[in-house]
Image: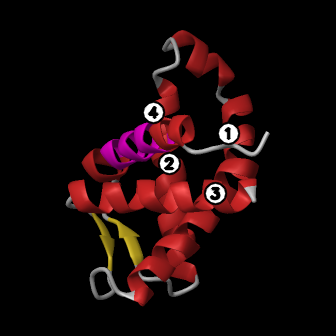
Amino acid sequence: MKFIIRTLAAAVALWVAVQFIPGIDVNAPANSAQYWGVLLLVALIFGVVNAIVKPIVKALGCAIIFLTLGLFLLVINAGMLLLTSWISGQFDIPFHVADFYPSAFWGAIIVSVVSWLLGLILPDGD
């Protein structure tokens, strides 16, 4: 149940990013079943990327993260969003992030903030 709630929260966070960032697009009819299905699939991919790739990148870049007082984490989060976009493209999922800055950078910030806020509101099942 916790996995489903987190995936739905990530889909909502991605939806907010799509609404506010011009370079992040879902190429499906707006607010249709296909549109929300794409967002759910992308949320699943984003979750897998954050669970598998992000810890490795953070471990390799821990010195840079330390030297920048954690600001490099913003770059890592943007990279994870770009990687999610690339993986989605490989599976012909109509989700696209245009570029690193400003699209992926600001999109990652919005996804992080919205996910954090939803995590405060939604039950976590513990």
Identify which residue is drawn at 42% across, 45% down: 108
The amino acid marked with disc number 4 is: Leu
Mark 1, residues whose alpha carbon is within 10 Å: few (<14), some, or many (≥20)? some
Mark 4, residues whose alpha carbon is within 10 Å: few (<14), some, or many (≥20)? some
Report if residue 124 lies within the magenta region: no
- x and y, in percent, of residue 35 in the image: 39, 82
State the SS at label 4: helix
**Badge 2 is on which residue?**
79
Mark toward the start of the polypeptide (1 vs 3): 3
State the SS at label 1: helix
Is residue 1 rendered to the left or right of residue 13?
right
Mark toward the start of the polypeptide (4 vs 3): 3
Magenta residues span 105-115
The amino acid marked with disc number 1 is: Val
State the SS at label 3: helix
Quadrant location, the C terminus: top right
**Badge 1 is on which residue?**
57
Q: Are marks 4 and 3 in contact (CB under 8 Å)?
A: no
**Badge 4 is on which residue?**
74
State the SS at label 2: helix
The amino acid marked with disc number 3 is: Ile
Identify which residue is drawn at 36% across, 43% down: 110
Cα distance between the residues tagged 4 and 1: 12 Å
Identify which residue is drawn at 65% across, 17% down: 63
Is residue 66 rendered to the left or right of residue 11?
right
* Closer to viewer: mark 2 or mark 3: 3
Q: Which mark is residue 5?
A: 3
- x and y, in percent, of residue 2 in the image: 73, 53
* Closer to viewer: mark 4 or mark 1: 4
Residue 7 at least partly seen? yes
Cα distance between the residues tagged 4 and 3: 24 Å
